[in-house]
Amino acid sequence: MRNGTIPGGRGLVRPMRLLGDPVLRAPCAAVEEYGPDLDTLIEDMYATMYAARGVGLAANQVGVPLRVFVYDCPDDEDRRHLGHIVNPRLVEADGVRVRGPEGCLSLPGVEAGTPRFDRAVVEGTTKDGAPVRVVGTGFFARCLQHESDHLDGGLFTDRLTGLRLRRALRAARRAPWSTPAVPAAS
């Protein structure tokens, strides 16, 4: 944060892409140009994440198919983690596998117990191109894995099976934001 400014304070809230939008299912391209356009995207992503009351947001969730995500997420000890990662790579996901409640800004109101590792490490760069390595545990590890999945065209529902998957997809189909592109529960 420069000069005490709040991330997203200068950003615009962008429309959220919802389940069924093809941009959510396509792997994102690497960021190759660093500069004002990337700065603006990141500012807008923070503004959008805060407006939606989320803890993380991937660029494809606002319709930009680039490998970028932002986060403002607590861990299990209630320590705040605030930042962004450009061209992130999930390099480690290990520890105990925990099934915990998980939702998504692209599936508003839908939540399910989703298995994730309790520890995650993501490497990438900052918006200025400086290398960054982020280590998360607990809920923050869940956030890092969730946002990394988005950039590969994945959603948390891909990690569900059986009754949990059927219930989540049924809730999505019944949601007021649902479109005909929302998959049916099998």
Image (spheres, rainbow, N blue to C red):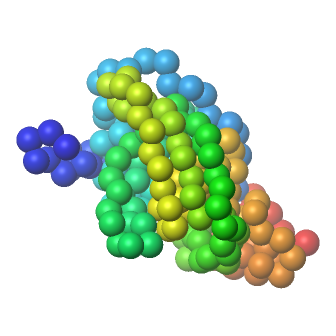
Residue 73 x, y percent position in the rendering? 39, 62
Total numbered badges shown on the rendered structure: 0
Viewer-nearest residue: 164 or 117: 117
Residue 49 x, y percent position in the rendering: 39, 57
Give the farthest residue toward the top. Answer: 33
Q: Nearer the viewer, residue 76 or 83?
A: 76
Quadrant placement of the C terminus: bottom right
Picture coordinates of residue 48 (x, y %)? Answer: 37, 54
- State which quadrant residue 65 falls in: top right
Identify which residue is drawn at 57% across, 70% down: 103
Query: In the image as oriented, which residue stretches furthest toward the front?
Result: 95
> Residue 74's image quarter?
bottom left
Residue 70, horizontal then vertical, whole percent = 41, 48
Seen from this angle, which residue lies furthest right? 186
Left/right of residue 60 with respect to residue 154 in the rendered view: left
Judged left or right of residue 153, residue 161 is right
What residue is drawn where x is 87% and y is 76%?
162
**Closest to the observer: 186 or 150?**
150
Image quadrant for the N terminus? top left
Residue that appears at 50% across and 62% down: 137
Query: Would residue 173 appear left or right of 146 to someone viewing this image?
Result: right
Q: Locate residue 54 relative to residue 151 in the image: left or right.
A: left
Residue 53 visible in rendering? no
Q: Is residue 120 visible?
A: yes
Farthest residue to the left: give it.
Answer: 3
Residue under the point 76% across and 60% down: 158
